[in-house]
Image (cartoon, rainbow, N blue to C red):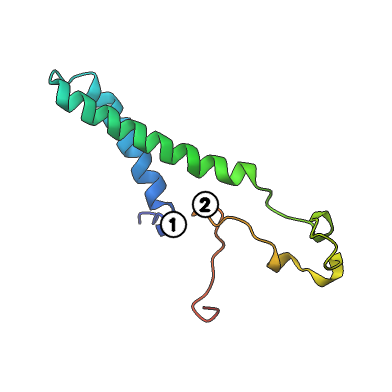
Amino acid sequence: MRAKLPYKKIPLACALVVACVSSLCAFFVTDIVSLFLLIELASAASFYLLLVTAIPAIFPSEVKPGAVFIGGVAKPPYISKEELFRPATPLTLEETSHDER
């Protein structure tokens, strides 16, 4: 039986396939318009891959509430880890059940 690809990683797989295929096809195309189209597809997919991999690398996976400066409004016991903002990307999202929504 085939292993199913998680739906959150499908855009990553599609971008990787588009980048590879368009880069390889660009070597065999003789028409200049088609060449620019393939180069544009490869650069857009590469930019997406760069952002998807760079955002989780920049932000820490766990934030200590005491390390956050909040201007003296509240002390660290009044802030929890759930209140801190982190970017949600498809690679860092946790699985949630339908009951929690």
Q: In the image as oriented, which residue stretches furthest toward the left?
A: 31
| Of 49 and 5, the residue lying toward us | 49
Report the side of 99 relative to 63 (left or right): left
Location of residue 96 with respect to 86 vertically, above or below: below
Quarter location, residue 28? top left
Quarter location, residue 17? top left
Report the side of 18 relative to 32 (left or right): right
Along the polypeptide, which appears first: circle 1 or circle 2? 1
Distance in Å between CA atoms under marks 1 and 2: 7 Å
Q: Residue at x 48, y 37 (%)?
A: 50
Q: Position of residue 89 (x, y in %)?
A: 52, 54
| Of 68 and 17, the residue lying toward us | 68
Location of residue 69 with respect to 20 vertically, above or below: below
Quarter location, residue 20? top left
Q: Residue at x 49, y 54 (%)?
A: 90
| Of 65 and 53, the residue lying toward us | 65
Disc 2 marks a residue whose amino acid type is: Leu
Q: In this figure, which residue is indicated by the disc labeled 1?
A: 8
Q: In this figure, which residue is indicated by the disc labeled 2?
A: 91
* Kind of element beneath mark 2: loop
* Kind of element beneath mark 1: helix
Q: Position of residue 88 (x, y in %)?
A: 55, 57
Report the side of 54 relative to 46 (left or right): right
Whether pointer 1 and pointer 2 mark residues with C-beta atoms closer than 8 Å, the reply is yes
Q: Which mark is residue 30?
A: none
Location of residue 23 with respect to 66 vertically, above or below: above
Q: Position of residue 92 (x, y in %)?
A: 56, 54
Report the side of 69 relative to 3 (left or right): right
Q: Position of residue 101 (x, y in %)?
A: 51, 78
